Structures are given as C-alpha cells and as structure tokens.
Amino acid sequence: MKMTLGVATKCWENWMDCVFSWNHCATQKRKMYVVSNQTILSAYEYILRHTNSDIIAYLHDDLMIYEPGWDTRVMLQFQDPKVGMVGFGGALGHGVPHLYTAPYYLPNLARQHFMSNMRSAETHGARFNGQCDVAVLDGFSLIVRRSILEKAGGWDQRATYFMYAEWLSCEVRRQGYRIRLVGIDCEHLGGKSSTAGLTDNYEEAHRYFYEKNKDVMPYAVTG
C-alpha cells in the first residue's frame, strides 16, 4: 500500500515548517499533495480526485510531527484489512448514550474520553502513546483508506469544517471498519489555515450531522 500526504493550506507564516516535519520524521519520503487557498473540504475533495494512493493522510498544516518512524506505525495498522482509518487524536466515545432518547441538545454530540500523545495532551484529555480502537478522530490527522471515501461518494460538503472529522468517523463505522488511534509524538498548533476566513454555520452543521447519522450514533468502544 502507498500513502499520500494531503494538506490544505492558506499559507500561514510557518506552515512549511510543520509540513517539512512529516517527511523529515518518516522512514521514507512520502508523496505530498498540497492544495492552497481553498476551504478545507473542497481541498480535501480535490486531493481525493487527483491522487491514486491506497491511503490518504489528511494532515493539518499546523501539525508538527516529532516522532521518527511515525509512518511505519501508521501503516502497520492498515495491515489489518478491518482497519479503515488511523489518527493521532481520538476519543473512546462519540455522543452520549441518551443522544436520541432526549430532545436535541448540541453538546450531547461531544466526543467522550479524548486521548492523544500531543505535547499538550493533558490540555485536551488524557495522554496515550500506544495504539487502540477509538470511536472518533480529531480532524488534525485523518489517515483513511481511499476506498471508504469513494464508496461514500466523496467528502460530504454539508458536514462543513465543524463536523467533517465526525462525519468521516461515522462513515468508517457505517462501512464496517475500525478506527485506530496511534499515539504519535506531535503537536497541533491549531487555529491556522483551517479556520482562516471561516464562514460555516456551527449550529446548522451539528444539526445536519445529528439527523444524518442516527444509524451509527451514539457509539462507544467496548472491551
């Protein structure tokens, strides 16, 4: 299997330092595809349609990777044909158990028990440097089988910036695949290209997600 590193950027000041770290710490130089000055989902769809690798690593342009050999750890996960997606930050639960038995309440869609090995891990949840199944991944690193996106008909633009990672996590589960968290030594600086000039509607995106994913929500990893 081959992996392409895909990045959407609006060229913030130090974005190239972050992107350089990916191949600098990889065991081999990975092909990179950069899309500039588009919304994140239009860029991600463009990457899907203009590359051909089995695995696409959608990484934010404000992600610094510090761990040598991170790509080997990731690709080892995909040796299991049941694994559909891998990321560096994820949660064991997706939505509260009473999500659809109580009236709609946006905070009930939240991730439960978030883990990562970011340098600031404890700010966001718990520190984790191993690998395990999770319910949902954070959007700063979504490394996914191309076939899953193709079967889904591409990126759902209505998920918007606010819910695209949650949408894809649901789609991976819907297609019967597992999601894996790999605790890579990294840092997500946050608030750079992905939010530049953002006009997406937060409330509408969550309500759309809530209505669309009743078949796979809520979900929690057990065992």
Image (cartoon, rainbow, N blue to C red):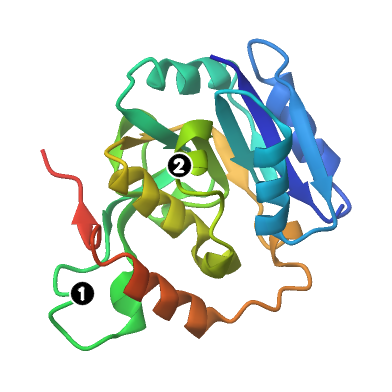
**Residue closer to the observer: 184 or 210:** 210
Q: Is residue 82 left or right of residue 56?
A: left
Q: Which mark is residue 108?
A: none
* Coordinates of residue 164 in the picture (x, y in percent): 52, 59
According to the picture, the residue beneath numbered tag 1 turns out to be 99
Q: Is residue 101 above or below residue 14?
A: below
Q: Nearer the viewer, residue 215 or 116?
A: 215
Q: Which residue is mark 2?
A: 151
The quadrant holding residue 65 is top right
Instruction: Tell me what residue is drawn at x 62 percent, y 23 percent.
Output: 53
- SS for callout 2: helix
Type of the residue with mark 2 = Lys
**With 183 as the anchor, is 71 left or right in this view?**
right
Residue 116 horizontal/vertical position (percent): 43, 43
| Callout 1–callout 2 Cβ contact below 8 Å | no
Q: What is the total number of numbered labels drawn onto the structure image?
A: 2
**N-terminal-most mark, 1 or 2:** 1
Residue 201 position within the rendered picture, expressed as x and y whole percent measured from the top left: 59, 81
Whether residue 181 is visible here, answered yes or no, is yes
Residue 184 drawn above or below residue 45: above
Give coordinates of residue 165: x percent, y percent: 49, 55
Q: Residue at x 60, y 43 (%)?
A: 187
Tell me the quarter of the image containing the C terminus. top left
| Helix, strand or loop at mark 1 | loop
Report whether 32 appears left or right of 72. right
Quarter-wise, where is residue 57 in the image?
A: top right
